[in-house]
Image: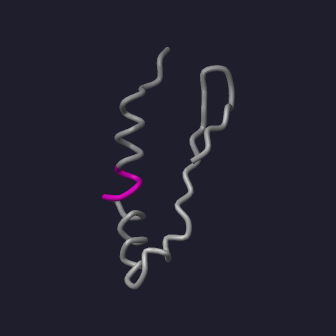
Amino acid sequence: MRFVAEAPGRTRVELEHRRIDRHGPGWQSLRDGVAGDQGWPLYLARYGALFPEVS
């Protein structure tokens, strides 16, 4: 996870999930799960909702 300052009051968060193959046999199912609608996209959206933009 990286936090990149883009402008005053604005930060981009970059998330990279790598070496998932280390989870052993069946790792492809894990990869598909975290990439699906109920995986990282869902949890990142929930996290983002905790910090709405302030005008």
Query: Is residue 14 inside the magenta stretch?
Result: no
Q: How many labels does the image show?
A: 0
Q: What is the chief secondary structure element of the magenta stretch?
A: helix
**Side of 38 relative to 28 (left or right):** left
Q: Where is residue 13 in the image (x, y as percent from the top left)?
A: 57, 41
- The answer to whether residue 5 is above or below residue 15 is above
Residue drawn at x 39%, y 63% as measured from the top left: 34
Write down the quadrant of residue 31 in the picture.
Answer: bottom left
Q: Residue at x 68, y 32 (%)?
A: 6
x 35%, y 58%: residue: 39
Nearest the viewer among 47 and 23 is 23
Q: Which residue is drawn at 37% across and 33% down?
A: 49
Q: In this view, does 32 lie above or below 1?
A: below
Residue 40 inside the magenta-drawn segment? yes
> What segment carries the magenta color?
38-42
Q: Tell me: 13 left or right of 48.
A: right
Considering every residue shown, the one lying at the far top of the view is 55
Residue farthest to the left, as pictured: 38
Residue 51: x %, y % from top left: 42, 27
Pick the residue in front: 18 or 48: 18
Q: In this view, does 54 lie above or below 52?
A: above
**Relative image position of residue 26 (x, y in whole percent):** 37, 83
For the residue pair 48 and 18, the one nearer the viewer reads as 18
**Percent of width and height locating residue 17:** 52, 61
